[in-house]
Image: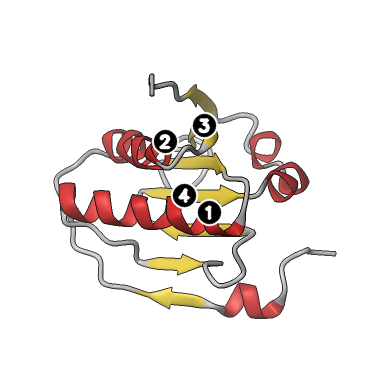
Amino acid sequence: MSKLSSEQTIATQKQPHVQSAVSSKELAWQIAIAADDKKAEDIVLLKVTDVSYLADYFVLITGFSPTQLRAIAESVEEQIEEKYNLSPVRVSGKKEGHWLVQDYEEVIVHTFLPEEREYYNLEAFWGHAERIEFSQHR
């Protein structure tokens, strides 16, 4: 049984998306930097290009409270909009604040509380994808 409520699954916002010349790899890395600015932990990029048609990269992020998750998501949206004039085509989970998803088409951002990240274990599900550890000195 899924932990996602029907309200959480349906609560998806459509937002404008403008194409940019940025590569999906650079976009994923800049998203990780924006998350790191809000003290996100355990940031991992999964290169899913060869194993999924959904996106080129998933960026997996851990935050420790619903407030921090929303701050991370807002930092990502603000910095990516400012740097590349891009907005996510869909955003889900901001209201609930346990697992936020931001869809930038080529890059999908998953920002979790630790319990949700452990429960859904996307790293294991996409275990055959190339794993890129993010590290940046604060």
The residue beneath circle 3 is 44
Where does the image place residue 113, in percent across and percent down from the top left?
Answer: 65, 49
Where does the image place residue 36, in percent across and percent down from the top left?
Answer: 42, 35
Which numbered mark, 1 or 4, is in the foreground of this view?
A: 1
- Label 1: how many Cα within 10 Å (few below 14, some 14–19, many 20+): many
Whichever of callouts 3 and 1 sits on the residue coming sooner in the sequence is 3
Residue beneath the point at 64% across and 59% down: 98
Q: Is residue 12 above or below residue 110?
A: below
Q: Is mark 2 on a helix, strand or loop?
A: helix
Residue beneath the point at 62% across and 69% down: 96
Whichever of callouts 2 and 3 sits on the residue coming sooner in the sequence is 2
User: Mark 3 and mark 1: span between their CA atoms?
Assistant: 16 Å
The residue beneath circle 2 is 36
Which residue, as the protein is rendered here, is positioned at the far right?
Answer: 1
Whichever of callouts 1 and 2 sits on the residue coming sooner in the sequence is 2
Where does the image place residue 73, in percent across and percent down from the top left?
Answer: 43, 55
Q: In which quarter of the image is residue 105?
A: bottom left
User: Mark 4 and mark 2: span between their CA atoms?
Assistant: 13 Å
Q: Which amino acid does label 1 sit on?
A: Leu
Whichever of callouts 3 and 4 sits on the residue coming sooner in the sequence is 3
User: Mark 1 and mark 2: span between their CA atoms?
Assistant: 12 Å
Q: Which mark is residue 69?
A: 1
Whichever of callouts 4 and 2 sits on the residue coming sooner in the sequence is 2
The residue beneath circle 4 is 109
Q: Is mark 1 on a helix, strand or loop?
A: helix
User: Mark 1 and mark 4: span between their CA atoms?
Assistant: 12 Å
Q: Is residue 46 above or below residue 87?
A: above
Mark 2 touches mark 3? (CB < 8 Å): no
Mark 3 touches mark 1? (CB < 8 Å): no
Where does the image place residue 88, in percent across and percent down from the top left?
Answer: 34, 62
